[in-house]
Image: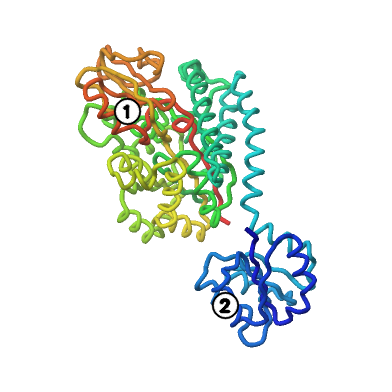
Amino acid sequence: MAVTILWVDDEIDLLKSHILFLEGKGYKVVTSNNGADAIEIFGEHHADVVFLDENMPGLSGLETLSRIKQSWPGVPIVMITKSEEESVMNEAIGYGVCDYLIKPLNPNQILLSLKRNLENKKLVEEKTTQSYQREFRNIGAALNRNLSIHHWKDMYRQLVYWELELDKLQDTGMKEIIKLQKSEANSVFFDFIKDNYLQWLKEASPDRPVLSHLAFREKCLPFIKAENKVFLILIDNLRYDQWKVLQPAIEQYYRVVTEDMYCSILPTATQYARNSFFAGLMPGEIEKRYPAYWVHDSDEGTYNQFENELLGEQLKRLGSSFKYHYHKILNLTSGRKLADTLGNFTDAQLNVLVYNFIDILSHSRTEMEVLKELAETEAAYRSLTVSWFEHSPLHEIFRLLSLKGISIILTTDHGSIKVNNPTRVVGEKNTNTNLRFKTGRNLSFSAKEVLEIKNPGEAYLPKENVSSNYLFAKEDYFFAYPNNFNYYVNYYRSTFQHGGISLEEMLVPLVFLKAR
């Protein structure tokens, strides 16, 4: 079916050659020499695109544009004018034109505008598909090589980039391919972690990544010392792909100085990874050195209630005596209160802000059917993250901090993965309830689907009993008990969980930002 163009110009007869050119290219052109008639004609023909002269007697081009947009907001409108004044361009763009052409017109200029506004999506889709198909082979070949942690970070960046690019397309087949390639990458990554993780904890080497307990000391502290004032914002459970979809909104106020990743420790769970980040110690070391600040899985109480104290102890050990404030946001009310009183805290060189929303979102999605529908896919989960941020107090905090010229470190404690494959586990009554890792005595499990750490001390992990060990689920597996197995599998399948071994859980964003 031919594309219909409505061309509105009080000198439409002088444009006959351009109209014939477009009709020769297969376009249908409907014309009008005034704005009032154009609105009526548009209602009859429902043109695919409008070419609109800016300077017309009677109803001006901008007035015509405004009225068309009120009734048909989605139609692309190309403003055509003799004027090169910046104020006219700004006004037209403000009204929502998709292109701006200056007379005298060139036929190819018109054709390019049509392709850009009507065929752009199709052309981009074709180009993106072709580009990923070439990259697919390169990624596949790389997975067969012996990758270092630095290669894995680059690999994960590539996978996330293509996942986000393919999100924009209608081609569900390509989306399935990237999904399968990510699954293959996670399978190889599991073997990589299995072979290297304990060695990283034994000795420092060029191949060892920055782990949770090293991230503040090795990455954050040098930036804090170099800047006048810094907010360290830790969004609980923020994956790298979620950072990438939030980046455009944040870049309204901040420019990225450095975008990096660090590697979350095991378990990739808040109790372990975040306490380790703030303490600058592995969980087993926290338990020994600060027993009052460590809460076991079987104990009652909040697992992360001593982050402020652990950070203070780390700063003392590092010889840093600058003033800092610590804030934890658990709900909308406390977020708004902090945004309203932000000026009370900007005197300190460091402010630490833990924002606990995405973790709540992932847990709530498991429990609430409406959230499962709103965030059914990975793309929808990312979209929900963006929607939350743009309407949250945190967005306002970013804006206010940028006005004050305060630099930001944006990071997280761990990520999460959408689980699909159950693996059976049997344990004693006091075995923890996390779906991606287990710790306890006499655990029975499928060895090919987990990493077992028999001696928690090797991984600097606490143990409540002499015979306790740890299990970590690989890829997108999750633990389920044989009792009521089918019920729990159906309940937890396709939910977002953390604690185990995957790219999404372990390779997390660490971003350094300066105000624009």
Q: Which residue is found at the position 31% from the left and 32% from the top? A: 492
Q: Nearer the viewer, residue 102 or 75?
A: 75
Q: Is residue 233 above or below residue 493?
A: below
Q: Is residue 283 above or below residue 173?
A: above
Number of marks in picture: 2
Q: Is residue 177 visible?
A: yes
Residue 39 has which mark? 2
Query: Of the residues shown, which amino acid type is indicated by label 1?
Result: Leu
Q: Nearer the viewer, residue 4 or 256?
A: 4
Q: Quadrant of residue 286?
A: top left
Among all residues in the image, which is located at the extreme bottom? Answer: 58
Q: Which residue is found at the position 73% from the left and 77% from the top? A: 83
Q: Quadrant of residue 165?
A: top right
Quadrant including the C terminus: bottom right
Q: Which residue is found at the position 35% from the left and 40% from the top? A: 362
Q: Is residue 354 visible?
A: no
Q: Earlier in the sequence, mark 2 or mark 1?
A: 2
Closer to viewer: mark 2 or mark 1: 2
Residue 435 has which mark? 1
Label 2–label 1 contact, CB within 8 A: no
Mark 2–mark 1 Cα distance, whole angstroms, equals 59 Å
